[in-house]
Amino acid sequence: MGETKISGKVQTVLGPIDPDELGITLAHEHILIDFLVFFEEPEESTERRLAHEPVTIENLWWIRQNLFTCLDNVRLIDEKTGIRETMRFKLAGGGSIVEMSNIGLGRDPKGLARIARATGLNIIMGAGFYVGHSQTEQVREMSPDRLAERIVDDIVNGVGETGIKAGMIGEIGAMVPIDEFERKSLRAAAIAQQKTGAPFNIHSSHSDNLILDNIKIIKEAGADLSRVAMSHCDAWCITDDVLQRILDEGCYVEFDTFGYEGYFPPYQGRHFNFPTDEQRVKTLLRLIEKGYLKQLLVASDHCVKTSLASYGGFGYDHVLTNVVPLMKLNGISETQIDTLLVENPKRLLTFA
Ligand SMILES: [Zn+2]
């Protein structure tokens, strides 16, 4: 593992901080995101009209069934909304947010820095590349070494001319079936991790096999699996057996879709439903009882307007306001909750 000046620190958009300053941390969110990658223009003219309307109480009935078919719903691009919404987390006792919008998701370093200053929250920004079809042809053509250089540069020197540095490699995107770019991008992330000692997070889409395949790719490329988090391990019903295989490889398992319950629009011709928060908590408890407490992370992956409190959603304070009481009711202790929300993200986010 290469040693950088940031070794032993956490890198936020406003500079390095001592890991003890993090406090309660949401391990996977989006505050500013242009999530156009899954937007699909409907065929029908009436639906096309709905697809281009702003999110209001009048069209929520349709958007709830068509999360990614409403253009306005997939764009969190208003700073003032970002400040107001993340303040809910701060006021509930939160300290830090890992913002995973990297290349392909409309990353906005200056916007995130302003939100960090306005709210007093620590914001840790992502680097690297989201799924293959969110990338330009120019990026898709790059070699793994060139992609890795780009990630290292964002961590060591900052994004472009902004001087604002990423503190996380992720979320690195992989879809089913994984494409050639995504394989390169995973290898590049593993290379960049070895050069910087940065934490590393993978977005794997709804397939147990894909997650295990992603781990194999980064392992072969030399990644430190004890500093890798697998996102969305609670977005569909992964069996305990597969969750344990991920944990036994040394990775963190991230339960980051708290608040998303039940219906999810079919995509890629496949259909699945989100579990309930109660089911998520019960799975966490089983993993804790099996001895995996120190490898579990929690968040609520806000990436659409309808998940924000201003638009009738559960808000960034959901984990603290609603999930923590549910954890306690189900027998997860205060000390264990502290490990999930403070100690585990702190260990992961501290540069090696
Ligand atoms: Zn995400």
Image (cartoon, helix red, strand yellow):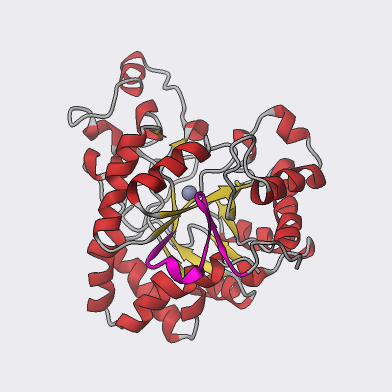
Queried whether the magenta region covers residue 106, the answer comes back as no
Q: Which residues are magenta?
A: 8-26
Residue at 28% x, 64% y is 93
Residue at 25% x, 52% y is 88
Q: Is residue 191 left or right of residue 82?
A: right
Residue at 37% x, 40% y is 304
> Where residue 277 sits: x, y (%)?
30, 63
Q: Toward which corner of the image does residue 220 lie, by quadrant?
A: bottom right
Taking 102 as reference, is 90 above or below it? below
> Where residue 200 sits: x, y (%)?
61, 59
Outermost residue, top side: 45
Taking 297 as reference, is 62 above or below it? above
Q: Toward which corner of the image does residue 131 lie, by quadrant?
A: top right
Quarter placement of the C terminus: bottom right
In the foreground, 239 or 352: 352
Is residue 123 at least partly visible in the picture?
Answer: yes
> Where residue 250 sits: x, y (%)?
62, 75
Counting the numbered discs, the total is 0
Queried whether the magenta region covers residue 19, the answer comes back as yes
Residue at 47% x, 33% y is 34
Is residue 317 at least partly visible in the picture?
Answer: no
Quarter placement of the N terminus: bottom right
Outermost residue, left side: 58
> Where residue 324 sits: x, y (%)?
27, 70
Taking 344 as reference, is 107 above or below it? above
